């Protein structure tokens, strides 16, 4: 069934990309689904504000970014995130460490991405996984293009560090093909 307008159809086509980005931003699938739903609701109710001919994807990702930032500024979210991170790190638990969890955990891309600072992770995800240009990302996160490039460079370097096995004597180089 087709939507009410081509813009609505284009928004529907963006749902998989929005979900993928939300899943990497949020700690769990339910929060990601809520973020996507809130993004689509806001985009649909404000579709008249979108300028035809401009980038609808960048507009929708900007809405998602702003909703996510607003949500993370709430004290409840920060407390839950701190508790989740502590639980992931094993702090405050009496459980014995898993012997199989050595460098195998360091190779887990999702975990490495979540270890990045939020600003770096957002830029990396938009460039590497959503194939957005630096200019589009700058518009989404509302920073200058140079800041996008700087955050991306730091994110890639940190990701390489996190994914390198301990004691790897090979020269540091791009091991993960996330670059454009």
Image (cartoon, grey):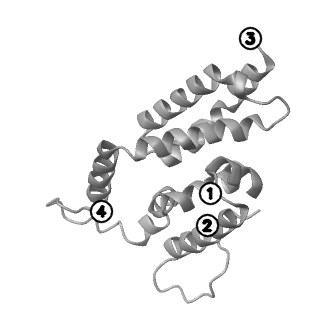
Query: The residue tagged with tag 4: helix, strand or loop?
Result: helix
Residue at the farthest right position: 53
Look at mark 2 in the image and give the residue it sits on: 151
Q: Judge left or right: residue 13 versus residue 84.
A: right
Look at mark 1 in the image and give the residue it sits on: 123
Q: How far is the residue under mark 4 from the one under mark 3?
A: 47 Å
Q: Is residue 24 above or below residue 163?
A: above
Query: The residue tagged with tag 2: helix, strand or loop?
Result: helix
Q: What crowding class fits label 1: few (fewer than 14 Cα within 10 Å), some (14-19), or many (20 or more)?
A: many
Residue in the picture at 76% in, 23% down = 7
Q: How far is the residue under mark 4 from the one under mark 1?
A: 25 Å
The answer to the question of whether label 2 and label 1 lie on touching residues, with beta carbons closer than 8 A, is yes
Look at mark 4 in the image and give the residue it sits on: 89
Q: Nearer the viewer, mark 4 or mark 1?
A: 1
Residue at the farthest front position: 49
The answer to the question of whether label 4 and label 1 lie on touching residues, with beta carbons closer than 8 A, is no
The answer to the question of whether label 1 and label 3 lie on touching residues, with beta carbons closer than 8 A, is no
Q: Earlier in the sequence, mark 4 or mark 1?
A: 4
Look at mark 3 in the image and give the residue it sits on: 4
Q: Quadrant of residue 128?
A: bottom right
Q: Earlier in the sequence, mark 2 or mark 4?
A: 4
Q: Earlier in the sequence, mark 4 or mark 3?
A: 3
In front: 67, or 99?
67
Q: How far is the residue under mark 1 from the one under mark 3?
A: 32 Å
């Amino acid at each position: 069934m087709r939507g009410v307008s081509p813009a609505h159809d284009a928004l529907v086509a963006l749902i998989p990309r929005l979900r993928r980005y939300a899943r990497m931003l949020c700690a769990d699938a339910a929060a990601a689904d809520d973020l996507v739903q809130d993004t689509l609701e806001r985009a649909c109710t404000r579709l008249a504000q979108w300028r035809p001919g401009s980038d609808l994807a960048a507009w929708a990702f900007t809405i998602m970014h702003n909703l996510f930032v607003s949500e993370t500024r709430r004290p409840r979210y920060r407390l839950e995130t701190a508790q989740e991170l502590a639980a992931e790190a094993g702090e405050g638990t009496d459980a014995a460490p898993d012997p199989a969890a050595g460098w195998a955990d360091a190779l887990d891309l999702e975990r490495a991405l979540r270890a990045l600072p939020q600003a770096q992770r957002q830029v990396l995800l938009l460039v590497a996984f959503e194939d957005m240009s630096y200019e589009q990302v700058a518009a989404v996160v509302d920073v200058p293009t140079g800041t996008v490039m700087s955050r991306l460079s730091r994110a890639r370097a940190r990701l390489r560090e996190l994914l390198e096995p301990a004691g790897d004597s090979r020269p540091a180089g791009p091991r993960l093909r996330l670059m454009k």
